[in-house]
Amino acid sequence: MKVLSWIRAALMVVVLAAAYDSLLAHTWGYLSAIGWADWWMAAFPTKHAAALSWLIATHTAAVFAAAAPVALASLSVLPGRPVLLAAMAGLAVAVIALLPETTPELWPLAWGAHPVFLVTDQLKIIVAMPVLVWLLRKLPSGAGLSGRDLSDVPGGS
């Protein structure tokens, strides 16, 4: 029976990682196509700082927007260990996202331009979903999904 639970968990990691990867590509594509607001450029001393901060802000928003529905799904798929499941799916997506950049042609470009962005982007992808799962489990509204007893929650039965 223990083997079946491992197989089920591995299958759920693959399914959640595929959903997360697809949502991440769509949300990042959508948010990058929006363009910055007029007031954003005036809020920074240089155009470079404004563009860079807009890129970081939209990427972070896209990562968390893509992670939210998948984090919610991981709560119901494996209620016993949803944070671990979310972390494994996030790690799988980060590896999938990093693999194309490890080719000899792209690695100098990816690592040479802004290595800090390469590392922080992967960390955001790995950490976003477990953090959202953890937060959802801490919220009283998420108590029903986390398998906790609602009797100690005000208004719970």
Image (cartoon, rainbow, N blue to C red):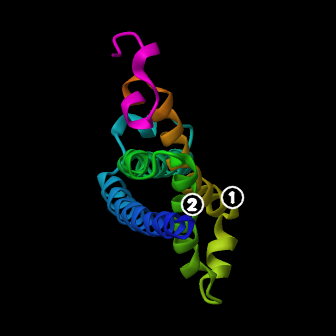
Instruction: Answer whether residue 154 is magenta in the image.
Output: yes
Q: What residue is shown with label 2? A: 88
Residue 137 to residue 17: above or below? above
Instruction: Kindly report the distance in space between the C-alpha atoms of the residues bearing marks 2 and 1.
Output: 23 Å
Tell which of 11 and 95 is nearer to you: 11
x and y percentages locating residue 18 in the rendered image: 40, 68
Q: What residue is shown with label 1? A: 116
Number of the front mark, 2 or 1:
2
The earlier-in-sequence mark between 2 and 1 is 2
Tell which of 154 and 68 is nearer to you: 154
* Residue name at image x 52 percent, y 71 percent: 97
Instruction: Answer whether residue 46 is magenta in the image.
Output: no
Amino acid type indicated by mark 2: Met
Quarter of the C terminus within the rendering = top left
- What are the residue bounds of the magenta stretch? 143-157
Relative to 134, 68 lies left or right: left
- Using a 10 Å C-alpha cutoff, classify the residue at mark 1 as few (fewer than 14 neighbours), some (14 to 19) or many (20 or more): few
Relative to 112, 69 lies left or right: left
Q: Residue placed farthest to the front in the image?
A: 1
